[in-house]
Amino acid sequence: MNQLDVIVIGAGIGGLTTAALLQHRGLSTLTLEQHTVAGGSASLFRKKGYTFDAGASMFYGFGKHGTGGTLNLHRRIFELLGIEVRTVFDPVQIHYHLPDADSAGHFYSVRTHYDREKFFAELIQKFPHESEGIRKFYDELEAVYDIISSFPAGSLEDVAHLAKLGVKHPKKVYDLARFTFKSMGKTARAYITDENLLRFIDIECYAWAVQDATATPLVNAGICLADRHHGGINYPIGSSGAIAKALVDGIEKFGGEVILGRAVSEIIIRNGKAIGVRMESGKEYFAKAVVSNATVWDTFGTLVKDEKYKVDESKFITAPSWFQLHLGVDANVFPEGFEVHHIIVEDWNTYQKGGTIRLSAPSLIDPSLAPAGKHVLHAFNESTADQWTKRFSKDPDYETAKEQYADDLIARVSRVLPGLKDAIDLRFIATPLTHKRYLRRYQGSYGPLLKANQIVLQKPQNTTPVDDLYAVGDSCFPGQGVIAVTYSGISCAHIISKKFGVKFEYV
């Protein structure tokens, strides 16, 4: 039995980060991915000269060291691996288009600028009576960020790591413990009373956490909503797939292997320990540790066959999936100064029920993604697998429903991009069933979310009930988003390094 040190199931960003850092430390790794491309929800696909992000187009973690106190994990990882990922800076995180207070169907705009004072000026112009509360609330997020950005990224399951932090930063550890029990929504309401402004703060959370502010831990918000004013938003040249490619290159540079297009059917467990994996082909690989980048439900409902490990679905909220529309469009449809990322909220009563539309047009800052005179446009909104029925391949009813929904979404987006319908050169559609099929994610879901009464530390960590089986990705602390799963990968590599007696090199 030719035994490896670590097998990683799934080449999502969390799994690849784990494998790259472990391989760099001299442990032998094998990463197995059922899809033909690496990156998971942050992969890419190409059609007729266009390059599309399969998921996210907005990335933290590439800030320069000189920007001061940033959580620039991607940059630090790639510098450690000796791999270059070129990026382009985006000065506006998101341009929000929000309903007017009079419900007249008009939008008012708020741009979340990299420049913190510029952002404040724009928000205070809309809510001048809340100027003091705005500053005090966002200062709370800054305080959380200041603490977290001063700590080295590591596993919260390593008692020695926590002890070192406690000795070196006793006050910051104490303050962070206090912040852990707070939500963003309750903190906002301590300083702000205007309901429309509180709704804006809700959508600030919903934009990346798929929950309102009350259900969003203050610690998570402090990272994402403060770092946009430090490390900022930077797009990897060539699409989101550049991140996954760089991690694969790093793994292979240090002797590891990544195999694409090969699906794992089972995690082999003997005497309560994970000892390897069985492929759908029947081939088996063995290792001293196994890491699953699958969701918690796919790991313990499909890959681990023993029913006693199955996760109770009521333990967490199952995040929704997405209806996604990938378009190639004529460049002239975009007005001068149109930002890369937009969120359209049509109605505050339905914003969590499909009434929020997300837009990304990354070719506005990376022209390599589209042919000359064209741009890529990604429009998507919340959807769930149970909203779609597909009886068989090429089911005409399913195909018709997709096209009708896409037409409706284009009409809704046209409120901020007039003339879009006539500017479309190419379109591709994905439903939650598409995500379920290609990404093998439970119900195509964005992963487990915390309930309103849960704190961030109740998010699963990297160790699992099965010995030598570890988890990584959006099912783990700290949660959803590319930078969050990157952190989970660093944390997982940390705890596995300790298992093997290998010194972990902080990034």
Image (cartoon, rainbow, N blue to C red):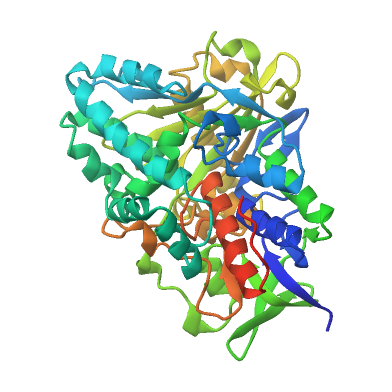
Residue 186, image x and y in percent? 22, 45
Nearer to me, 340 or 220? 220
User: Could you tell whether 495 is left or right of 230 in the image?
Assistant: right
Q: Residue at x 58, y 50 (%)?
A: 486
User: Could you tell whether 337 is left or right of 287 in the image?
Assistant: left
Q: Quadrant of residue 234?
A: top right
User: Could you tell whether 214 is left or right of 376 in the image?
Assistant: left
Against 290, residue 474 (above or below) is above
Nearer to me, 242 or 79? 79
Residue sticking out furthest to the front: 167
Nearer to me, 490 or 343? 490
Residue 214, image x and y in percent? 26, 46
Q: Residue at x 64, y 43 (%)?
A: 76
Q: How many marks?
A: 0
Residue sticking out furthest to the bottom: 271
Residue 74, image x and y in percent? 62, 42
User: Could you tell whether 22 is left or right of 487 in the image?
Assistant: right
Q: Quadrant of residue 199?
A: top left
Can residue 55 be spotted in the picture?
yes
Residue 385, image x and y in percent? 48, 54
Against 285, residue 506 (above or below) is above
Q: Quadrant of the N terminus?
A: bottom right
Can residue 407 be spotted in the picture?
no
